[in-house]
Image: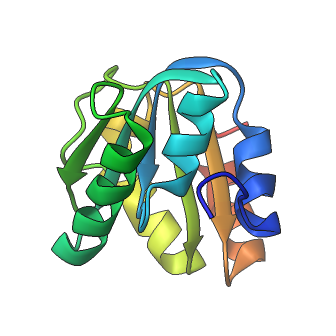
């Protein structure tokens, strides 16, 4: 799967513009950071997840891809383990709209410094759009 992203993951990866550093929140297998790094869309990435199991799988995939220097693992609840300005973009994909909004709200200090948010809520899409408008996102 590493070389061939699913259509859903590919659609997300295609939205990322060339960046120095990106964080994939809820990374699961780290397929998107691996793809972005291999295709030179980003120089480095953080693969982040709240659960240890997905991070273990992600780390295995990153190691197999030979990208341990470019992709770092962080166990994090949303954006909590990022510092403001540490990354230029975040990917928050494949989770419910309520969780997407909570991540952006709780991580507001980091979110305010981002140049790009790639969001793919699986529910409550209209609510997420309204949240983004009400909170000054473009």
In the picture provided, is 34 more to the left or to the right than 56? Answer: right
Return the x and y of residue 116 as percentages of the image width and height: 62, 32
Which quadrant is home to the C terminus? top right
Rendered residue at 28%/34% (across/down) = 68
Front-most of 24 and 118?
24
Where residue 53 sits in the image (x, y, percent)? 22, 76
Q: Left or right: 14 with respect to 76?
A: right
Quadrant in the picture for the N terminus? bottom right
Q: Is residue 120 visible?
A: yes
Q: Residue at x 41, y 68 (%)?
A: 28
Q: Position of residue 137 (x, y in %)?
A: 65, 40
Q: How many marks?
A: 0
Looking at the image, can residue 106 be seen?
A: no
* 131 vs 42: above or below: below
Residue for point 74% across, 74% down: 125
Give the colour scheme of this rendering. rainbow
Residue at the image position 53 percent from the left and 55 percent from the top: 31
Compared to residue 72, the image places residue 94 above or below, namely: below
Closer to the camera in the image, 73 or 93: 73
Give the x, y percent position of residue 111. Answer: 43, 38
């Amino acid at each position: 799967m590493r070389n061939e992203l699913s259509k859903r993951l590919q659609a997300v990866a295609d939205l990322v513009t060339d960046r120095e550093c990106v964080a994939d929140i809820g990374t699961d297998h780290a397929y998107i950071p691996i793809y972005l790094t291999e295709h030179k869309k980003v120089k480095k990435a953080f693969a982040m997840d709240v659960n240890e199991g997905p991070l273990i799988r992600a780390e295995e995939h990153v190691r197999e891809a030979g990208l341990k220097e470019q992709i770092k693992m962080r166990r994090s609840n949303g954006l909590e383990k990022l510092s403001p300005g540490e990354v230029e973009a975040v990917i928050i994909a494949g989770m419910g709209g309520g969780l997407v909004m909570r991540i952006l709200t709780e991580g507001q200090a980091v979110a305010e410094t981002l140049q790009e948010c790639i969001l793919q809520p699986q529910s409550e899409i209209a609510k997420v759009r309204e949240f983004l408008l009400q909170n000054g996102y473009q």
